[in-house]
Structures are given as structure tokens and as C-alpha cells.
Image (tube, helix red, strand yellow):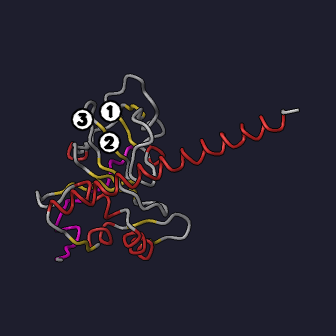
Amino acid sequence: MPTFPLKDLATIRMGVTLRGRDATRHDPAGPYRLIQISDLDDAGAFRNRDFVRITPRESFNRELLLRSGDLIFPNRGSRTTAAVFDDSDLPALVGPQFFIIRPVSDEILGAYLAWMLRTREAFSYFDANRRGSNVLTLQKPALEAFELPVPPLEVQHAIVEIDRLGHLASALESRLAVLRSLHLEQSLLQRAKLP
């Protein structure tokens, strides 16, 4: 299976730097949404779609507006997660704590790329390449150099679907465990109340 450095498969940019104390303050009428680290879970899903709305006080590079299909990947801290942005209702931005990864080839699915960036193999690679003492930071060259296999599209689709189903099965198993526990507790309470 051929492997390629990420820089051959996607353009990588750092998110927008918004300066000033009020740069990211919530503005209910703001024309842009700002996706923050706390909006993203470790499985690459958005915790909610109610992103903060902002009104930037200065101009910024419009190439940094998220497009449907872009990936966002945190570059600060120790989290290794990636999410595919698939919403284009209201323009959205990410700050400099994210990389914006934009696939440049039809031979790679954004969802597959996001999955690869969340694997244990990727975590080990990124963990070894983070720098800093107080706040760990992943530099762009380390992300660009990350090598990943690019199987045929049908295999990528299958991997993404199996991963999605695996997460769904885990969520259902967790819910079932809670329900079993509640059922057992209710049964025992009823037993305790018998004469």
C-alpha cells in the first residue's frame, strides 16, 4: 500500500489570528461562527452546532473561511482529534489553535483522512513531535510530514463506515449498560419492599 506525506494530499494552514480582547467575544448578530477546541470531541464529532458567533474587528484572509469538506485539527495541547467541517450555512472560522486541512485530491476522502489522524499510530507520531514545556504545540512541518496509506476509495469508504458503526455500537452498549443497571436497581428495590 503506497504511503504519502500529508503535504502531498492536502493544503495545511493555521486558523485565523484574531487580535484584541473582544476579538472572539460572542456577538449574537455576528456574521461568522467560531469553532473552538471545546466544540470538538475526541472522536472527531462536534459536541454541538451552536458555535459562538463573532464580528472580527479586522480583515483576515478569506481563504481561512472553512469550506465544506475541510478538516480541523488542534495544534496545541495533547489532543489528537480531527473533524470534517460539513456545514456551510453561515461562514465559519477557527482560531490559530487549529490547523485547517483541505484535501487537494479526489483520491482521498476527508472522512478517511480525519480517521487516520485520530488513530493510535497518528497519536504516537504527533506525541513524539509536539514541542514545548507549558503548552505542547505541533508545528506545521511535523503535520505535513505525517505519512499515511491511501487505499482505493472503496476501501476508504468501508473504513469510515466501519468506524462510524463501531462508535454507534459503543454508544448503544453504554446506553444498554445504564439501562441494565437501572433495571437491576428497580428490581432490587421492589424485592426490598416485599413483605
The residue range painted magenta reads: 2-19
Q: Residue at x 31, y 64 (%)?
A: 116
**Of the residues under marks 2 and 3, which one precedes in the sequence?**
3
Q: Which residue is mark 3?
A: 88
Kind of residue at badge 1: Tyr
On the picture, is 68 further left or further right than 152?
right
In this orientation, which residue lies closer to the viewer: 111 or 29? 111
Relative image position of residue 77 (x, y in whole percent): 49, 61
Give the residue type that dot 3 points to: Ser
Residue under the image location 46 percent in, 34 percent down? 25
192 or 151: nearer the viewer: 192
Q: Position of residue 80 (x, y in %)?
A: 42, 62
**Residue drawn where x is 88% and y is 32% of the image:** 195
As measured in the structure, the alpha-carbon distance from the residue carrying label 1 to the one carrying label 2 is 7 Å
User: Mark 3 and mark 1: span between their CA atoms?
Assistant: 11 Å
Query: Is 10 placed above or below 130 here?
Result: above
Lower sequence index among marks 3 and 1: 1
Position of 75 compared to 100: left or right?
A: right
Quick check: 30 above or below 80?
above
Mark 1 secondary-structure assignment: strand
The residues tagged by marks 2 and 3 sit, at their Cα atoms, a distance apart of 11 Å
- Residue beneath the point at 39% across and 47% down: 45
Name the disc covering residue 93, or none.
2
Residue extending farthest to the right is 195
> Do the residues under discs 1 and 2 have CB atoms within 8 angstroms?
yes
Indicate the amino acid at tag 2.
Leu
**Residue 107 in the image: above or below residue 147:** above
State the residue in front, 155 or 95: 155
Query: Which residue is labeled 1 in the image?
Result: 32
Secondary structure at numbered mark 2: strand
